[in-house]
Structures are given as C-alpha cells and as structure tokens.
Image: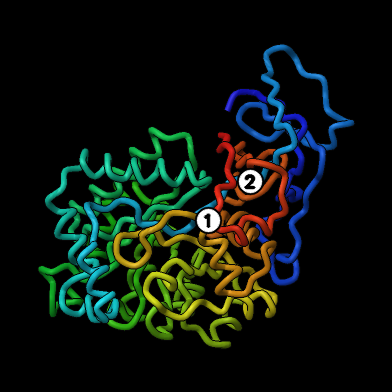
Amino acid sequence: MKDTLFVNIGRLAGILPQGIRKLCGKDMDTVRSLDNAYLLVRGGKIASFGKMEDVPSVSSDVFIEDLSGKMLMPAFCDAHTHIVYAGDRQQEFVDKINGLSYEEIAKRGGGILNSADLLHSTSEDSLYGQASQRLEEMISKGTLTMEIKSGYGLRTEDELKMLRVIRRLKENYPVTIKATFLGAHAVGREYTGRQEEYVDLVCNEMIPAVAAEKLADFVDVFCDEGFFTVEQTDRILKTGVRYGMRPKIHANELAVSGGVQVGVKYNAVSVDHLERTTDVEMEVLKNSDTMPLMLPGASFFLGMPYGRAKDYVAAGLPVALASDCNPGSSPSCDMRFVMALGCIKMRLTPEQSFNACTINAACAMGCEDVAGSITVGKKAGFIATKKVMDLGFIPYFHQTPFIDRVLF
C-alpha cells in the first residue's frame, strides 16, 4: 500500500497497544475501537491513528482517502488452510449425504488419498493456477494473512511440488503467507500396511529435502485415530524441530488422541481441530505458549461436534479460529462465516469470535507482530465495511455482504 492517510473513519475497530501477542480469557471479551478517526500508513505499515480532531498534516506525496463514515478493521487471519490441491472431491460430498462418515471414506481409500492421486498427475503450473484462484477468493473475502499446508502429495517430490507452489504464491501476492510441511497427513498408498516405513520416509527423506530448499516454516502431523500415533508424531516433530521447523499439529478431531500433549511438549505454535478434548487438555495448554486453534468449518461440513471454545475462554485460555479450507472436510475459505459459526455454534460473543479470527489467529501462525490488530508498526491490511456498524452485524447478518473494499 502506498503512503495513505485515511480520514473520516466512522469506527476504527480492533485496536491493540504494541506488545500484545494474544488475548486470553476475559481479555477476549473486548474489542477496542475509536469513532470518527484517522489512520496514517507509511512504508506499508501503520504509522499512527487517532481522533479526526488530531489528524496530522501530511506532505503532497501522501494519498488522502476519505472513508466517509465506514468502519475500518484489521483483515482476517486464517491460520489453518489446505488451499493447494488439485480438482475437488464432489463425489465424497455425495457419499457423506448418503451416510458415509469421514472415517469410513478414509478407510476405503478415499479422502486425502484421492486428493494425493489427483495431485500426482497435476503439473506444478496447473496446481499454482488453481491455488491462485483460491487465494484471490480468500483476499476478496478479507483474509490477508494465512497459513497454507502441503499434505496432498504423500510422496517426496509431490510434497515438494506443493511447497514450491506455496513459495510462488508468497512471491507473487503482497499478502503474508506461512508454509507448513504436512507430509504426515496420511500414509501414502504405496505404504499401505507399512506405516512405520512411511514415517521413516517422512523423517529421513521428506523433511531433509524440504529443509534443503527452505520451503516450510512449520512441520505438522495428523495425530489422530486411524492416522498417526503419539509416538510417530513425537518422532516427526522432533525431526522437524531439528531441521528448523516449528510444530503445528492436527489433534483431537476424531478422538482424544494425545496430540495436544505431544504438541505442547514440542512448543507447537498451535494445536488444531480440538473437536474432542477434555479438561485434561485444557490444563496442559494453560502451562504452555501453544494456541488452541479450532476449526468450526469442519464441524459444520462433517456434522461433528464443535470445539469447546466457550469453556476454553472461561478457563482463561486464548482461542483462535480458522477455516480449514480443503476439498474434503471444509470447502470454504470465508473467515466471516467462521466468525459467524464461532458465535452461532460455539456460543462465543461477537467480540470473542472477532478476536479469535484476528489477533489470536495471527498468533497461531507466529504473525502477531505484523497482523491481527490496529497497532502502530503492523503491516497495513484492512477491511473497509460498507457502512459504520457494530461488530455484531458481521456474524448476525452472516450472508449480507459487508465488505466495501479490502485494502492492502
């Protein structure tokens, strides 16, 4: 964004002082705002903001934009996505309608393995073209900071292909993207019945190859019933840490798996899903710097339980929300809908859900220093709404268009 002075902002929402990394417990109840405000962007960062009566004088090279009473808020942050994939899995959508569960589809060789088969026969350029369209949709819906995973390769070269596509997205779009290596998303077809050998492949070949090209910020494992055990997860995370990748982890989507505990052991930036957790997991997380990250889009699409977000907040913990955008269990990248599900299905207040989709989501991918709030020094990336509104409008009228422009 070029140097710009935004004036006549009806409401500037999502203000936080410098140094706040995340919001926990009761602190999630409040979203600070300022009415009749200005905001100055210099060098692509927030330089200052305040009341219109204190608007600064600027030189002629600064563009002045009158927001005419609209609300300005930080762009959404999406800390868990799988937008690099080939084609779709519409047939599985019909299978689910006809009564098959996610686990049943996976057991008969579908799900992630179907995506891996299709990705294997898709060129990098085609994969990049498809992912670009999804990324542009995310941007149009107000998300400017996102994490993107591999995990539909399940072969070394195909995992690298996915991560190279993510690198190209980073290079070609002026948004903030974090890349996650998820070779342990499922066991590749060639290794059916030989899971330990597949874990050997992930640790001894995939992770070193990913590190050699510096393709991933994080390492991830699907630690859950029918996928990877706690012991296998421990080994993969330990290897990833040795190669400079901080853990994130899929945990407790299908069962209480022990994934939260192993994630905390390795100081995971986040533990994701948490549809099925107990008070034990909450106690473990209280003594950590790991962000609980819940994915209500998957609960909605698969008809699974929703994470106990309200209980986590009541226990003094932070909560982040993300889309889990992927072709099998959450085919939507709309963080506004995620915010609405946080309120409608998880019983979060609009303020709590907003904070879960902005500052806490930024923290869940290590981006809290550049995104997630209106804070001096952070990267300029905003949603200008169609009119001044309360935050409650966004999840309440959850299908009514509210974005006037995405500014970055």
Are circles 1 and 2 on residues that touch, CB within 8 Å? no
- Residue at 67%, 25% (x, y): give it: 4
| Mark number, residue 74 | 2
Residue found farthest to the right: 53
Quarter of the image where one finds residue 181: bottom left
Q: Is residue 191 above or below residue 216?
A: below
Q: Is residue 220 left or right of residue 22?
A: left
Query: Sequence order check: which comes first, mark 1 or mark 2?
Result: 2
Looking at the rendered structure, the secondary structure element under dot 2 is strand
| Residue underneath mark 1 | 399
Question: As displayed, is residue 153 above or below residue 48?
Answer: below
Tag on residue 184? none
The residue depicted at 70 percent of the width and 21 percent of the height is: 64
In the rendered structure, the answer to whether residue 154 lies left or right of residue 142 reads left
Q: Position of residue 141 (x, y in %)?
A: 49, 46
| Quadrant housing the N terminus | top right
Amino acid under disc 1: Gln
Residue furthest top as drawn: 60
Q: Amino acid at mark 2?
A: Pro
Can residue 287 be seen by looking at this rendering?
no
Q: Nearer the viewer, mark 1 or mark 2?
A: 1
Query: Where in the figure is residue 355, as x and y percent of width and height?
Result: 65, 59
Distance from label 1 to label 2 (Cα)?
A: 20 Å
Residue 270, percent across and down? Answer: 50, 66
